[in-house]
Amino acid sequence: MTDFAYKPTLTGELVVLRPMDAGDYEALFAAMNDPEVMRFTGSHGEIGEERAREWCRTRKDQTDRLDLVVIDRQTDQVVGEVVLNQWDPDNQSCSFRILIGPAGQGRGLGSEATRMIVGYGIEQLGLHRISLGVFAFNPRAQRAYEKAGFKREGVLRDALRWDGEWHDEVVMSVLATEWIPSEV
């Protein structure tokens, strides 16, 4: 097991995942500020342009997380990001999150990006467990995660307050012992 200091470029049929840098800010900002994306990620507001640019610029220097942008191979445009974070080296585990903006939705880009980064985490980094949280009002994402090998573990009740209403968060994970590399 190594840390996340090495930032790979992974190439799939539909997407390329590559290290994030400052030049990705505009595309990521547009994706993150889409109202539907904000709702699905539970994001309540902006962090400010200067801070967001700094965030993009410094992701490649982090050794405890892996942030890669998702590039649509058809258009060569950044359409989102995939992240392995909350790394626990003692337990060989981490969390996963993905964000795909409107320009990349509905064409399987997120599904392929998910399989690629999870495969990398398990097969190359030696992770045993990768977990995620998805809000109960997003069954499409839950199905996509299930197709990628994630299994439902439980529910965090009333984990998100959105537009005055409480929503549950579904906890899911995939274990190395369940991972099927041939599906990558």
Image (tube, helix red, strand yellow):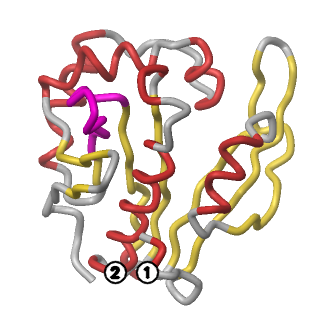
Q: Quadrant of residue 166?
A: top right
| 77 magenta-colored | yes
**Residue at 37% across / 13% down in the picture?**
30
Tell whether 150 sits left or right of 10.
right
> Is 175 on the left-hand or right-hand side of 54?
right
Label 2 sits on what residue type?
Glu
The residue indicated by pointer 1 is 181
Q: What is the distance, in whole Å, between disc 1 and disc 2 at their CAs?
A: 8 Å
Residue 9 % position (x, y): 16, 55
Q: Which residue is mark 2?
A: 123
Q: Could you tell me residue 48's position as x and y percent?
A: 34, 10
**Residue 125 sits in quarter:** bottom left
Mostly what secondary structure, the magenta segment? strand
Name the residue located 49 percent from the left edge and 20 percent from the top edge.
102
Residue at 65% of width from left, 22% of height from top? 39
Q: Viewer-proximal residue, 60 or 152? A: 152
Q: Position of residue 85 (x, y in %)?
A: 40, 55
* Image quadrant in which you'd find residue 124: bottom left
